[in-house]
Image: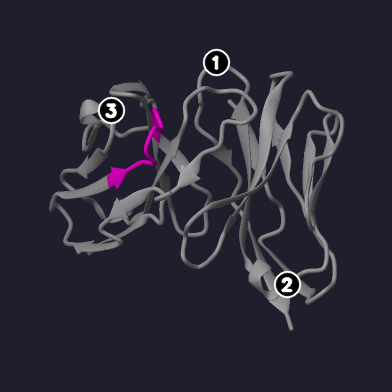
């Protein structure tokens, strides 16, 4: 079974440029998460989708970040314009979405963003 | 809001020995889930072990076991018979019990070094 797929793996851009990250979750997983992991830190949740609906976007900086999950499958996270402080690893994860003790989040390999 | 604290930025252990990684958390909730994730240099987060707070029995997965002290809000990970492949960042994480598949709250991580 294929895992969570993310692309690109690495991205280098200049500040003020736009950038987009793509995530394809595990087939059948209704819930999709975007996390940001700064250097030397644990991941922090940016947004959570249940199917097409963003149910938790309280930590998403809405002035420059946007996300979408059309058709409830793959998702795109966009930054426009990027700032130096956006340099981080952006992780996507997915889970079945049923909740409960067996609910497990499976993570992709992440996209490492460097803003110059 | 919940917080997770990992007070050991780095730990080192000889191959085949046992090591314990510490984690404390703060929450006002009475029931929740706790996790340990491993992140090797490839960056892909891998679930190591989970614990339901309403279960008194400590979880065990092969060489990995936890010491869950609910009153002390402590959740340590013990790795027995350490292997070179165990070298990675280890993150402690918290998830609310609430309906749906909430996002995880992570600690800052502990870098585990295995000395041959």
Gap between marks 1 and 3 measured at Cα: 20 Å
Is A64 placed left or right of B25 in the picture? left
Q: Is B64 in front, or is B25?
A: B64
Q: In the rendered structure, are the residues bearing label 1 and label 2 in contact, judged by CB atoms less than 8 Å apart?
A: no
Which residue is farthest front?
Answer: A1
Instruction: Return the x and y of residue A44 as percentages of the image width and height.
Output: 47, 41
Give the mark nearer the N terminus: 1 vs 2: 2
Write the residue at 55% across / 15% down: B99
Q: Secondary structure at mark 3?
A: helix
Marks 1 and 2 on same chain = yes
- In the image, residue A11 above or below residue B4: below
Residue B32 picture quarter: top right
Which residue is farthest top?
Answer: B99
Which residue is farthest left?
Answer: A17
Marks 1 and 3 on same chain = no
Residue tagged by mark 2? B83
Gap between marks 3 and 2 measured at Cα: 40 Å
Instruction: Return the x and y of residue A103 as percentages of the image width and height.
Output: 57, 31
- In the image, residue A75 above or below residue B40: above
What segment is highlighted magenta in the picture? Answer: A23-32
Q: Secondary structure at mark 2?
A: loop
Residue tagged by mark 3? A72
Q: Is residue A25 magenta?
A: yes
Instruction: Return the x and y of residue A48 as percentages of the image width and height.
Output: 39, 29
């Amino acid at each position: 079974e294929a895992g969570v797929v993310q692309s690109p793996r690495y991205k280098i851009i200049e500040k003020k440029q736009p950038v987009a990250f793509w995530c394809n979750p595990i087939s059948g997983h209704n819930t999709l998460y975007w996390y940001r992991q700064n250097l030397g830190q644990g991941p922090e949740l940016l947004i959570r989708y249940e199917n097409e609906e963003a149910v938790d976007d309280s930590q998403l900086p809405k002035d420059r970040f946007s996300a979408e999950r059309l058709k409830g499958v793959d998702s795109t996270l966009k930054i426009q314009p990027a700032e130096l402080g956006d340099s981080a690893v952006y992780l996507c994860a997915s889970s079945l979405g049923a909740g409960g003790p067996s609910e497990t989040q499976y993570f992709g390999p992440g996209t490492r963003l460097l803003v110059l | 809001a919940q917080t997770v604290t990992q007070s050991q930025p780095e730990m080192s252990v000889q191959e085949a020995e046992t090591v314990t990684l510490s984690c404390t958390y703060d929450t006002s909730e009475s029931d929740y889930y706790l996790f340990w994730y491993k992140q090797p240099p490839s960056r892909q987060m891998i679930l190591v072990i989970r614990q339901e707070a309403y279960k008194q029995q400590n979880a065990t997965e092969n060489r990995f076991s936890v010491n869950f002290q609910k009153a002390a809000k402590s959740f340590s990970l013990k790795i027995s018979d350490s292997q070179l492949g165990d070298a990675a960042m280890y993150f402690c994480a918290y998830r609310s019990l609430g309906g749906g598949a909430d996002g995880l709250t992570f600690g800052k991580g502990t870098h585990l070094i295995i000395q041959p």
